[in-house]
């Protein structure tokens, strides 16, 4: 899922301080799981803003609403009428959700409440780690399920660098070298010979932004490249 | 708890207004000390700036609710 962290409160407050009617739109999927932008966090931010702006003698009207996903038109389209009643919008979605919502409410100032950090996993409550860089070309099948693009700080595709010290990474000695992990995993799986396979250059040309994907079943409809 | 204190600090109300004490049910002296400490802290910080200014706390005697029978 997408992992995000809330922006410093003063940054959000300064952005919306000039407005009297503010709507905070939450997102109930990834950022809700990582406790950054779900319904509860929207309520928390609304209370903080009311109190902080109240201390400055302001009495803003702050609305709260949380949709299932802000990266899906199906869920944000019904917000159109709601948004019309407010002067400014705060979105607690990831960067994708904020931009999609922005396309919908382009007449109103829109501010992000989160800093989107990475695609990761929920290791345990409140602890998230990165696992995927969305690099367009997955190597997990040949690297024993450990991603060299993400888990190796240098993103090396064909074995460790020379900085590997006793199985630890030179960038962060507290972490295991991704390629040592890959070696051990392949060894355990009895397919160590796999590691001798030379991976071709990573197709960086495909990672040019902004990316777009059209499902094969919809190519005719959207006129995508064959 | 620390997170809640941090939220209060961020908005400018001050984290000193919130505290949590762990006190056993049988530990009355510790309870008294904690209440006194928090009371002194609250007096030192002054009234909640978000509440409209009020006069001194009324000392009138509380009376029980009157029984009203309708119908």
Image (tube, rainbow, N blue to C red):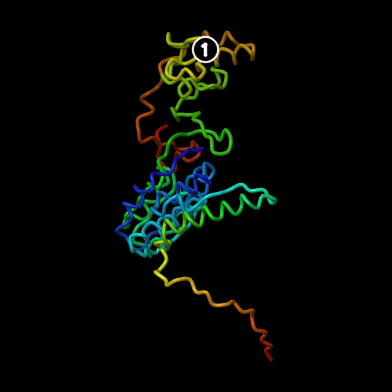
Residue at 56% across / 55% down in the picture? Answer: B35
Above or below A112: residue A55: below
Above or below A191: residue A16: below
- Quarter containing the C terminus of chain A: top left
Residue A125 sits in quarter = top right
Q: Where does the image place residue A7, in percent across and percent down from the top left?
A: 39, 44
**Disc 1 chain ID:** A
Q: Where does the image place residue A108, in percent across and percent down from the top left?
A: 32, 57
**A110 lies left or right of A174:** left
**B10 lies left or right of B70:** left
Of residues B45 and A157, the one nearer the viewer is: B45
Residue at 38% across / 54% down in the picture? Answer: A104
User: According to the image, label 1 marks what residue?
Assistant: A167
Determine whether the residue tagged by mark 1 lies in a helix, strand or loop: loop
Q: Where does the image place residue A124, in percent across and percent down from the top left?
A: 58, 35
Of residues A101 and B28, the one nearer the viewer is: B28
């Amino acid at each position: 899922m997408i992992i995000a962290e809330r922006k410093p409160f003063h940054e959000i407050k300064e952005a919306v301080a000039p407005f009297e009617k503010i709507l905070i739109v939450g997102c109930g999927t990834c950022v809700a799981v990582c406790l950054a932008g779900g319904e509860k966090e929207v309520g928390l931010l609304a209370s903080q803003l009311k109190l902080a702006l109240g201390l400055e003698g302001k009495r803003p009207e702050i609305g709260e609403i949380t949709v299932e996903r802000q990266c899906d038109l199906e869920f944000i389209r019904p917000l159109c009428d709601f948004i019309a009643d407010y002067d400014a919008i705060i979105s607690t979605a990831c960067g994708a959700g904020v931009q999609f919502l922005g396309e919908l409410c382009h007449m109103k100032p829109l501010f992000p409440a989160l800093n989107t950090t990475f695609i990761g996993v929920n290791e345990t409550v409140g602890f998230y780690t990165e696992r995927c860089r969305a690099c367009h070309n997955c190597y997990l099948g040949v690297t024993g399920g450990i991603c060299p693009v993400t888990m190796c700080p240098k993103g090396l595709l064909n074995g460790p660098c020379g900085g590997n010290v006793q199985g630890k990474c030179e960038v962060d000695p507290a972490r295991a070298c991704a390629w040592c992990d890959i070696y051990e995993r392949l060894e355990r799986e009895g397919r160590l010979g796999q590691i001798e396979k030379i991976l071709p250059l990573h197709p960086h040309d495909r990672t040019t932004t902004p990316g777009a994907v059209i499902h094969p079943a919809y190519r005719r409809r959207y006129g995508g490249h064959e | 708890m620390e997170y809640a204190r941090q939220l209060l600090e961020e908005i400018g109300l001050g984290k000193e207004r919130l505290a949590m004490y762990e006190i056993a049910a049988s530990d009355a002296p510790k309870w008294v000390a904690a209440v006194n400490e928090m009371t002194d802290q609250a007096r030192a910080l002054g009234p909640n700036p978000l509440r409209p200014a009020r006069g001194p706390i009324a000392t009138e005697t509380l009376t029980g609710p009157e029984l009203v029978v309708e119908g």
